Amino acid sequence: MSKFLSHIKNGMLLAVCMVFTLAFAVPVFAGTNIASYVIFDSTTQTITKYNRTDIAEIEIPSKISGTAVKAIGDEAFKDHTEITSVEFPNTLETIGHGAFKGVSFGTQNVYGSLTIPSSVNKIGYEAFAYSPYLKEVTFENYTGVGDPAAITFTTNGVLSNPGPFGECPQLLSITLSNQCQNLSYRFAYNSAKLKTVAWPNELKTIGTEAFRGDTALETGNLSNTALTSIGI
């Protein structure tokens, strides 16, 4: 009898340990405001580094300790493959080089989407590149007073680097806003499944190799845009 009870106790302990282990192995805190988990430079109003690895759905805060968040620094969230979705605040103005490079933006079973708020006016090269499950990107249209400021898509002069949405294998669609007037070098380079791009009327230039390798792309009607230059 004592051996039987011992086996039961051991089995119960093993089950408790398994539950405990599983609870900490799966990303948690869906939609978590990550203000407490980042390094924030209050002088430049920039998030420079993210320190957690177990949160799937994150919310970038609009303020940290009373200071508005205006920028996400270079490579701040790079290679955080556990992240499946990101919500940006309308205080955000700059997304740095490689800021979300390699972030999953979805899972193998459920591909994800991304919305860029109209407050953003600068996006670095490789900002969202190499995101394996990113399916849709939408730029919110500017609805304020007066003409919108164009978003600057920056490069670093290294010709081998993809642009902000390059090398995203599941990317199917991009909806550009009226602020997307000049698309950068290799903007969505080699995102081979990219099929549709909603072109804004204000579009003026498409950079060199912006959509190179995007063999599924249906260019649609560009005649309604202000396009004056297309790179080769």
Image (cartoon, grey):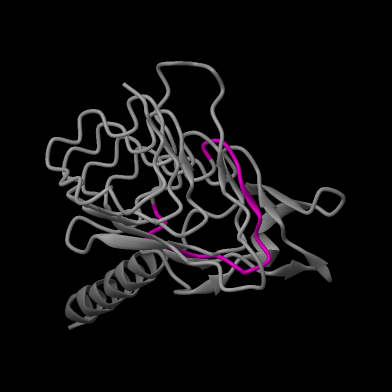
> In which quarter of the view is residue 109 placed?
bottom left
Question: In x, y percent, where is residue 164?
Answer: 44, 39
Farthest residue to the left: give it.
Answer: 216
Kindly identify the residue that appears in the image at 56 percent across and 73 percent down: 143
Farthest residue to the right: give it.
Answer: 43
Q: Quadrant of the N terminus?
A: bottom left
Total number of numbered discs in the rendering: 0
Kindly identify the residue that appears in the image at 18 percent across and 38 percent down: 192
Question: In x, y percent, where is residue 62?
Answer: 68, 69
Dominant SS in magenta: loop
Image height of 133 relative to 13, above or below:
above
Bounds of the magenta segment: 82-98
Q: Is residue 1 magenta?
A: no
Q: Quadrant of the C terminus?
A: top left
Kindly identify the residue that appears in the image at 84 percent across and 54 percent down: 42
Question: In x, y percent, where is residue 105?
Answer: 35, 56
Question: In x, y percent, where is residue 225?
Answer: 36, 51
Image height of 198 relative to 228, above or below:
below
Image height of 230 relative to 202, above or below:
above
Image height of 125 relative to 24, above or below:
above
Front residue (pair 71, 102) = 71
Front residue (pair 103, 139) = 139
Give the left or right position of residue 41, taking residue 78 as reference: right
Kindly identify the residue that appears in the image at 21 percent across and 48 percent down: 170
